[in-house]
Image: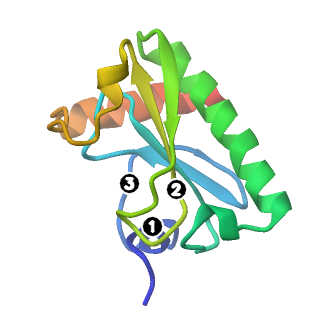
Amino acid sequence: MASLFTKIVQGAIPCYKVAETDHFLAFLDINPRKKGHTLVIPKKEVDYIFDLDDDTYMALMAFARKVAKAVEQVVDCKRIAIAVIGLEVPHTHVHLVPIDEIGDLNFERAAVELSTEELMQLASKISAAFE
């Protein structure tokens, strides 16, 4: 059965896309820890990040870096934190979270609420910064 993220890649589930290549996709997390929290995934469904082949792993990290730089241009923060947890969805994904303090990366905290309009505008701004 296809993962939630594979369904997003296939267009069966919508997302707030910020960047895309032939092999990778980045979109806003709909339950963000902080405004600008972005998920970066390979389009190929592989559950565990360390099961990716070397080339895909390195390319995923390079793509995530470019996305992080775009997020940083749009969202006011001290840094972009990176987290790979891998338990929520059985599809490799990298969390890019704008942070001002270590507690901003606490995944047990309640998500920040953003309206559909805010998410659409934010995705558009990050996408423009990515290009």
Residue 93, label in figure: 2
What crowding class fits label 1: few (fewer than 14 Cα within 10 Å), some (14-19), or many (20 or more)?
many
Q: Could you tell whether 107 is left or right of 48 in the image?
A: left
**Which tag is nearer the camera, tag 3 or tag 1?**
1
Residue 86 % position (x, y) = 46, 60
Q: Which residue is drawn at 31% across and 24% down?
A: 104
User: Farthest bottom residue?
Assistant: 1
Residue 5, label in figure: 1
**Which tag is nearer the camera, tag 3 or tag 2?**
2
Q: Could you tell whether 47 is left or right of 99 in the image?
A: right
Q: Which amino acid does label 2 sit on?
A: His
Q: Is residue 35 visible?
A: no
Residue 128 % position (x, y) = 57, 27
Marks 3 and 2, how far apart at CA: 15 Å
Q: Residue at x 64, y 40 (%)?
A: 64
Instruction: Determine contact: label 1, label 2, CB under 8 Å.
Output: yes
